[in-house]
Image (cartoon, rainbow, N blue to C red):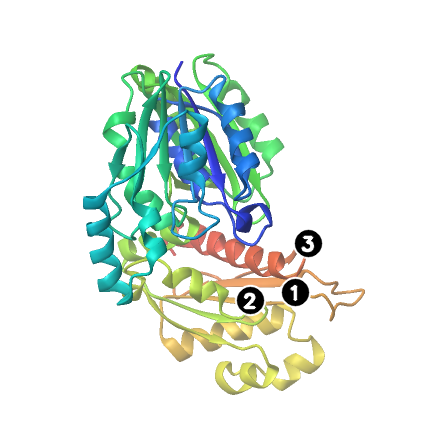
Amino acid sequence: MNIACIITTGSEIVEGIITDKNSKWLASKLVSFGWKVDKIISVDDDYNSIKNALECSVKNCDLIIITGGLGPTKDDITRNVVAEFFEKKVIFDERLYERIEKKVKEFAGVVVETIKNEAMVIEGAEVLENDVGSAPGQILEVDEKTVVLLPGPPDEMMNVFSKAESKLIKNERFFTRILKFYGIKESILEEELNSIIYAYPEVKAAFQADYVKGITLRLTTDEKKREIVNSIVEKIYNKAGRYVYAEGEKEMEDTVVELLKNAQKTLAVAESCTGGLLAGQIVNVPGSSKVFKGGIIAYDNSIKIKFLNVESHTLEKYGAVSKKCVEEMLAGTMNLFNTDYAVAISGIAGPSGGSVDKPVGTVYIGVMGKNTDKIIERFYFKRGRNVVRYKSVYTALDMLRRVVLGGG
């Protein structure tokens, strides 16, 4: 089997300053190309750390991909460590430098001396051009191993990786389908699907649960047996299709916007504790302007009264975090924006503000359509302020998804 390892370098990764998005993207690509990813290692911009990661990977990996450390500064040492590890020289490429120099002049206007480091190429390596930034990648065949060096910034990494794709695709490729579920616990979903997904030993089924985004199920097999996976997916839809909100790389908001487009319906939102997160999630989707009219961030009660016509009596008697308040927020949103659907959220994200009756994490979410009854539910979310907010957004989107699918 073709075994691959991924090494990501950077103090900003191991110190938790940024999230390592590169390895997730690369692993998904490699699996689709027919590779089995054996390990993913993140290390500091440090000679011994990178060398140890190489020693760990070279033992049983046919392909080693390293991201980061190809820039011009002193801590960009990846190419030198790799060259020394495989007993290769590092050679200055004059023509490559001329191309890099031209890019840097166009972008920054000034070219510093250290930019020459980006034109240092490992002996025997092929240069992988970088159309987004200045630091190119490199691909090296050595000791029956393939070593690919990629820049660290995700947009540059993806661009440079595309130049190596043709050399990495294997004949024995895998076929994967990814299903995303919401509104059901992982243990219950697995029990429901147990007789379906584990009936074929040649298909690998892997669950991944996320408190905010729900459950992801990956079904993987040999490319030649893709019809088995397709058959399993069809059975899953028959059994638990109501919980499936997306496939592949699609997210909940993509599905909701697509459903609204297909139905030629419009949407507006009213948000309190989520503070605009719901609207932001929707407008992340290209083309959302065709269905999304706008929203009100009614964080303060005076805004609920002034713009959404929430009654003062309602706030005094029931409070802002109540079914009655959300009901009036929905009606006010529909009237203000004249849309086909409205969503309203009001809750206590914390860390303070809770009570015995309404502890921190209590959220009311409502969905309303011109031709549907109002659906307002009370939820209790845990795990901290921002988790409560994001969980509220995904729950609201899923509620809206179900309502739109119901034809209301």
- In this view, 80 is above or below 328: above
Q: Quadrant of the N terminus?
A: top left
Determine contact: label 2, label 1, CB under 8 Å. Answer: yes
Answer with left or right where residue 322 lies relative to residue 25.
right
Q: Which mark is residue 191?
A: none
Cα–Cα gap, marks 2 and 1:
8 Å
Q: CA distance from mark 2 to mark 3?
A: 15 Å
370 vs 103, nearest the viewer: 103
* 137 vs 38: above or below: below
**Disc 1 designates what residue?**
349
Q: Percent position (x, y) of residue 400?
A: 45, 56
Q: Nearer the viewer, residue 212 or 32?
A: 32
Residue 64 pos. (x, y %) = 41, 27
CA gap, disc 3 and disc 1: 9 Å
Q: Which mark is residue 382?
A: 3
What's the residue at 24%, 63% (across, down)? 105
Element type at marker 2?
loop
SS of the residue at dot 3? loop
Label 1 sits on what residue type? Ala
Q: Given the current orientation, which residue lies at the most extreme right position?
A: 356
Q: Residues within 10 Å of mark 1 (few under 14, many from 20)?
A: many
**Mark sitting earlier along the chain (2/1):** 2
What secondary structure is found at the residue carrying circle 1? loop
Residue 3, image x, y percentages: 42, 20
Amino acid tagged 3: Lys
Q: Residue 276, percent across and down?
A: 49, 69
Q: Which residue is mark 2?
A: 274
